[in-house]
Image (spheres, rainbow, N blue to C red):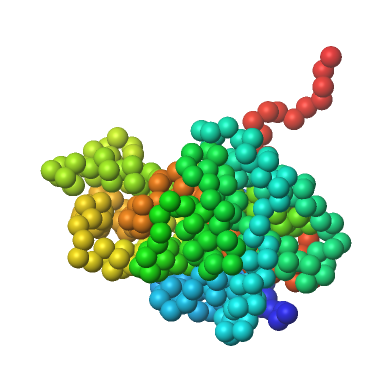
Amino acid sequence: MRRHKYEDERLLVIHETNGQQFNLNLFEGWVLASEVHKIKDNQGRALKILDPYLMHTAPSASGITLIDETNDDLYYRGLPIEQLAANFKYIEVVHLLLFGHLPTIIERELWRERIARHAPLPEALCAIIDAIPQGAEPMGALVSALGALASIEPIEAEMLIDPSIRIDRLARLIGLMPQLVGRILTNCIGGERSDVPSNISYTRLVWASCLPSSRPSAADLRLMETILIVHADHAMSCATHVLRAVSSAEVDPILCAAAAASALSGRRNGSASKEVLKMLRAIDEKRNLAEFIDVRRKNGNVLAGFGHTVYEHADPRANILRNAVLEFTKGRKNTLLDTAIELEHAVSSAEAIHPSKRFPSIEYYAAIALDSLGVPPEIFPLLFTIARTAGWAAHLEEMARTPTEQIMRPRQFYRHDYPIGKFVE
């Protein structure tokens, strides 16, 4: 593994009170927290950083995904997301994220076969899932099922030192996820149960698990492929940060995925596309969009699916999905898509909205894309979880291959809400 020397320029910090000078090493515009620790106050205490939401802090270094915030670009292992979405299959992108290179034809088939071997669900897990009552929340059921799987198929941390065993564990996680989601959906929201052969393409497996009653066309599968690819990883997202934090304690990868899936289930995360769909369906065709925007803003309601915390002017994944849906629906009427595009144009010129909130995020057009395929809204977070499992596996493998990894233990700033004193009887 290539090791970086975190030093390519220096920053001089002068303490205004005591005149002390501190030279901090910088690396590509970043300063290491250990460098900030060099700065001392008048009592000799080292300076610490308070960043409650980690908006300006990188909790780890990674070579998997690059988000170019200045140019609004996204790269998986150095390759532009636009090229990957246009030219490759999801299973090839999974290989790229996990192993660092796109597979040859032979590597792709071997990888597909390896994942397929790990796809079947154990009978004990099926029994647990089947005990979940209809109407239960699907993402909660998925988290529970992953926890149950880790107890049914336990693995010792020492065994994961072996790269082959570790990759098999990750292949197990990736391979069974569609079947697991399909079984959960049947129990939670009803519908037919059918045995899905694991030797079909991964994208077909995802389709059969989420939409078992329909037979996909080539265009359906291409759009589904695109959706999976653009959701495969997104650097240090909330769920991925949770995954890496849990993994730092040397936890089973399947339990790490359960923790990450919990984060992905939130309304601000994997469920955001459901809010987009709800908002778009609430817009009357005859209603003035400028009025709609103004009413929501004055009522304190955000416009679901607009803006992003790491992009300044555009989310490249949203652009990919917009173009994919336009191609998919060419020659057909799609009222929801028409409304979405009209609203996007109206928001982009709304001066009352901050410029960072005037562009659509991935959640905006993911809602339109999935709705165009006939995917029910309650399935959205589960499908995103299937897609993101690739990125999670890549992060887990990267951490396992980093010899300097240690348990994450952030500091905490105490707010002094309660005075410090002795106990008085």
The quadrant in which residue 161 appears is bottom right
* Residue found 72% across the figure and 57% down from its top: 253
Q: Nearer the viewer, residue 167 or 81?
A: 167
With respect to residue 25, does 422 lie above or below?
Answer: above
* Residue found 21% across the figure and 52% down from its top: 335
Check the picture and name the quadrant holding the C terminus: top right
Residue projecting furthest to the left: 286
The quadrant in which residue 26 appears is bottom right
Check the picture and name the quadrant holding the N terminus: bottom right
Estimate the x, y position of residue 24 in percent, counting from the top left: 66, 70
Q: Nearer the viewer, residue 166 or 407?
A: 166
- Say if residue 264 shows up in the picture: no
Estimate the x, y position of residue 111 in percent, counting from the top left: 64, 74
- Say if residue 390 shows up in the picture: yes
Is residue 144 left or right of 361 when viewed as pictured?
right
With respect to residue 37, does 275 lie above or below?
Answer: above
Q: Nearer the viewer, residue 370 or 133?
A: 133
Q: Nearer the viewer, residue 177 or 162?
A: 177
* Residue found 35% across the figure and 47% down from its top: 276
* Residue found 52% across the figure and 43% down from its top: 186
With respect to residue 409, does 36 lie above or below?
Answer: below
